[in-house]
Image (cartoon, coloured by chain):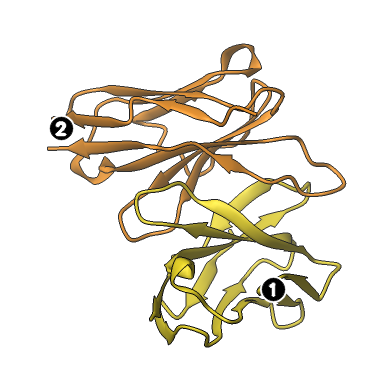
Chain colours: A yellow, B orange
Amino acid sequence: GENVEQHPSTLSVQEGDSAVIKCTYSDSASNYFPWYKQELGKRPQLIIDIRSNVGEKKDQRIAVTLNKTAKHFSLHITETQPEDSAVYFCAASKRPYGQNFVFGPGTRLSVLP
Amino acid sequence: EAGVAQSPRYKIIEKRQSVAFWCNPISGHATLYWYQQILGQGPKLLIQFQNNGVVDDSQLPKDRFSAERLKGVDSTLKIQPAKLEDSAVYLCASSQTGTESPREQYFGPGTRLTVT
């Protein structure tokens, strides 16, 4: 089955700096890669996603890149703010979209003022 | 629109007891997921329903866990008997059905289960 690894497990950055979180997946059939943000004690919320036919996607300060050949995808957050502090989870899913979701173990991001 | 509802929010039981969780998805969402999230880990998919049929239950410990989604709307997840390692947050999520494009999963607030 699919295996999703995520690095680093914890990340601390200064406010205004950039943060990058990387995930690798094992199943080449996976074709949808969402990123979720989970604040302490709250539910996961989708922040950005990418499909396998797209190499990069941006939404304001966040972007996701996908390298299908290497089977890895990354989340990039620029100009980090204290409210970006949370646990970020990547996930991989197969066709048809929305099946066999496998989440990574998470990255705890701390943005220091 | 109203979000995914779950109850109870918290539950404490002793090992070997049974427990049930309830989920009401967003209206019109045909796909429903149950996840187990152990502290410090990512959500682990237990079971996925499409309407009232099971799409994926490969990671559901079927000797003790069961789930149903009668009438394709609400769903219940049951654990019987519970073990200490079942202590976790149980998340329910729902989404519209995606065939040509992915659909966002909306998560409920979760049920925090403590087994003592």
Q: Give yes or no for contact between labels 1 and 2 (Cβ–Cβ under 8 Å).
A: no
* Location of mark 1 (residue): A64
Q: Residues within 10 Å of mark 2 (few under 14, many from 20)?
A: some
Secondary element under disc 1, as helix, strand or loop, is: strand
The residue shown at (45%, 39%) is B91
Query: What residue lies at 49% left-to-right and 69% top-to-bottom?
Result: A84
Q: Please report the residue visible at 53 percent of the width from the left and 78 percent of the height from the top.
A: A80
Residue B15, labelled with which disc? 2
Q: Do labels 1 and 2 share a chain?
A: no
Q: Nearer the viewer, residue A113 or A31?
A: A113
On residue B73, the disc is none
Quadrant position of residue B78 = top left
Using the rendered image of the protein, determine whether residue A106 is visible from the camera's viewpoint. no
Is B61 located above or below residue A5 in the figure? above
User: In the image, what residue occupies the spot 59% across and 75% down?
Assistant: A24
Residue B86: give x, y in percent of width and height: 28, 41
Locate residue B34, reporting x and y percent: 50, 36
Tell me: residue A19, above or below residue A4: below
Look at the numbered disc 2 and give the secondary structure of its residue.
loop
Question: Quick one: B25 or B86, which is closer to the camera?
Answer: B25
Percent from the top left, x then y, of residue B100?
Answer: 87, 46
Mark 1, chain letter?
A
Q: Distance between the residues labelled 1 and 2?
A: 43 Å
In which quadrant of the rendered view does residue A54 lie?
Answer: bottom right
Q: What residue type is labelled 1?
A: Val
Badge 1, how many Cα within 10 Å: few under 14, some, many 20+?
A: many
Question: As rendered, which of B36 and B103 lies closer to the eye?
Answer: B103
Mark yes or no: residue B105 visible: yes
